[in-house]
Image (cartoon, coloured by chain):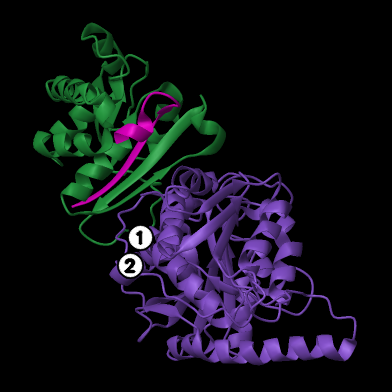
Chain colours: A green, B purple
């Protein structure tokens, strides 16, 4: 297993949270893992991204420059990184917010109207996790059981109701 | 756990009872973590009015013999430099964290290693050194903080953890060693109240008689000689048969390791040498690690600073080249690999 994952979007879309969820899934599964956010002004409303490396071997560079899994939650992120996805890699795009499609044929690109699905299913701020559901489905990287355990670790007890919402979002993503 | 938080947690577990800080990106999570937990831990957290105040509070706390720490990022460390010189001149143990960002001036907020010279050669006026540790993972940040407190107490001198924004912001799994903090006898010098029972202790760095001052400096340098002998540490990775040895420290070493692995897959005989202590520089270790090499490459997030120490360590016996990015740009494994190939790295 060797995943170099790049998640990118606007600050506030839950890019870092989605990455953190993957990181904890990997931790529970006994994998080597690194999680590296962009920080500073980017977190406060600009574009924001997060590198997650998951491997059976110790992680070298934690900075993902050529992802084999890329998640794009907005147009600027899609434009900036789609050309950098490694050949044979997979890209996951929120097609509600990203209007263009890639002409690359050497990668698999999945278009999921995640923001629209978030509204349709009354899952506010759930687009990131809906798209993550699609990632889990297409890569087979982690099971729902692992995701539940990871959510139980990172969602504070006072917000425990969010665990079920997140799992519902994952399910919707998987079904796309 | 984030690197910055791991540094804070490790410090508390090492028995740090006083933390004085001032916010600056990219190390603020460290102070925030301390703010939440230090008091519950029976210690003192104080956000000072400036970096200068914070380092002088460390001087005061360390004078009483408690374990004290401050943290900042590059511009903040420059502000602290006067206090650090006073601490060194007063022979006080403490730990200082620098989560480096791009410079000079206010610079930027992205990762950098351009404070190498400052940390190893010129952190304040006067003849003195700090112990300087360069972690390359979140786990190593934990281990090095604990070790830094011990070495600072052992040698009665300040120790620095020289990290960077990448390590500070990165999250990796960590385990905290289950050890009780070591206890050091500081009764011969700590100014912790004599209660009329003994002569008072004076913590001072002012000597108006040149001969008296010279003696304190010479004595300190005799101690540095012992440290140079005993306290060096480094990692050698695939250096045994390497034709090119790439030297890198901290986060850059992670990038270099990826490049070395890629080069090895292509059959290029390359290895990596990573100093874990920047002062004292691991001279013996680098000489041994580069025995089989015909060329050495230093990769840094700066315009080339450690490269000088490499040349000194091997007495310029082999060509030493440099590759780096600066200003907050992180070199990529592909760039490093291209440089290795350009140097004629072969089988």
**Chain at numbered mark 2:** B
Mark 2, other Cα within 10 Å: few <14 / some 14–19 / many ≥20: many
- Could you tell me if residue A89 is visible in this image? no
Q: Nearer the viewer, mark 1 or mark 2?
A: 1
- On the rendered image, what quadrant is the C terminus of chain A found in? top left
Q: Which residues are magenta?
A: A1-18
- In-front residue for pair B244/B197: B197
Q: Is residue A8 magenta?
A: yes
Please tell me the numbered disc located at residue B159. none
The residue beneath circle 2 is B261
In the image, residue A105 sits, relative to residue B46, either above or below, namely above
Proximity of marks 1 and 2: CB atoms separated by less than 8 Å = yes
In the image, residue A129 sits, relative to residue A4, either above or below, namely above
As helix, strand or loop, the secondary structure at mark 2 comes to helix
Q: Is residue A35 left or right of residue A142?
A: right
**Chain at numbered mark 1:** A
Residue B220, x across and y down, in percent:
69, 86
- In-front residue for pair A158/B338: A158
Residue A92 appears in which quarter of the rendering?
A: top left
Mark 1, other Cα within 10 Å: few <14 / some 14–19 / many ≥20: many
Q: Residue at x 25, y 40 (%)?
A: A22
Please tell me the numbered disc located at residue A60. 1
Residue B115, x across and y down, in percent:
64, 62
């Amino acid at each position: 297993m060797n995943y170099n994952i790049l998640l990118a979007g606007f600050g506030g879309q839950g890019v870092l949270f989605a990455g953190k969820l993957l990181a904890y899934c990997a931790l529970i599964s006994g994998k080597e893992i690194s999680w590296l956010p962009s920080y500073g002004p980017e977190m406060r409303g600009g574009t924001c991204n997060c590198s997650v490396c998951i491997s059976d071997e110790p992680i070298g560079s934690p900075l993902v420059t050529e992802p084999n899994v890329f998640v794009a939650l907005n147009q600027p992120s899609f434009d900036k990184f789609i050309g950098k996805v490694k050949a044979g890699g997979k890209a996951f795009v929120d097609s509600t917010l990203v209007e263009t499609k890639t002409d690359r044929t050497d990668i698999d690109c999945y278009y999921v109207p995640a923001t629209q699905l978030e509204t349709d299913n009354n899952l506010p701020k759930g687009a990131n996790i809906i798209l993550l559901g699609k990632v889990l489905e297409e890569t087979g990287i982690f099971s729902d059981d692992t995701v539940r355990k990871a959510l139980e670790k990172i969602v504070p007890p006072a917000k425990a109701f969010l665990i079920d919402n997140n799992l519902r979002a994952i399910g919707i993503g998987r079904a796309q | 756990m984030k690197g910055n938080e791991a540094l804070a947690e490790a410090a508390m577990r090492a028995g740090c009872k006083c933390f004085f800080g001032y916010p600056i990106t990219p190390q603020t999570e460290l102070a925030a973590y301390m703010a939440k937990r230090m008091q519950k831990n029976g210690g003192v957290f104080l956000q000072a009015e400036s970096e200068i105040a914070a380092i002088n509070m460390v001087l005061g706390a360390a004078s009483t013999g408690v374990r004290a720490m401050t943290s900042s990022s590059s511009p903040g460390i420059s502000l602290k430099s006067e206090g650090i010189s006073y601490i060194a001149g007063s022979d006080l143990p403490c730990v200082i964290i620098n989560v480096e960002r791009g410079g000079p001036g206010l610079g930027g907020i992205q990762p950098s290693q351009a404070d190498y010279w400052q940390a190893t050669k010129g952190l304040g006026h006067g003849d003195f050194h700090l112990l300087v540790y360069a972690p390359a993972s979140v786990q190593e940040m934990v281990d090095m903080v604990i070790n830094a407190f011990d070495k600072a107490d052992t040698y009665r001198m300040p120790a620095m953890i020289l990290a960077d924004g990448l390590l500070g912001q990165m999250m990796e799994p960590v385990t905290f060693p289950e050890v009780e903090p070591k206890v050091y006898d500081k009764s011969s010098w700590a100014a912790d109240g004599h209660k009329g029972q003994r002569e008072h202790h004076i913590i001072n760095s002012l000597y108006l008689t040149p001969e008296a001052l010279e003696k304190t400096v010479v004595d300190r340098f005799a101690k540095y000689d012992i440290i140079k002998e005993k306290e060096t540490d480094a990692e050698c990775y695939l250096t045994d048969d390497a034709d090119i040895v790439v030297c890198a420290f901290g986060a850059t070493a992670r990038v270099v390791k990826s490049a070395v692995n890629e080069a090895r897959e292509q059959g290029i005989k390359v290895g990596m040498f990573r100093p874990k202590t920047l002062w004292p520089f691991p001279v013996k270790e680098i000489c041994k690690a580069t025995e089989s090499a015909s060329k050495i490459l230093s990769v840094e997030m700066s315009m080339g600073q450690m490269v000088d120490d490499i040349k000194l360590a091997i007495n310029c016996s082999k060509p030493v080249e440099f590759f780096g990015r600066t200003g907050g740009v992180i070199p990529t494994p592909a760039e490093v690999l291209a440089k290795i190939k350009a140097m004629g790295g072969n089988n």
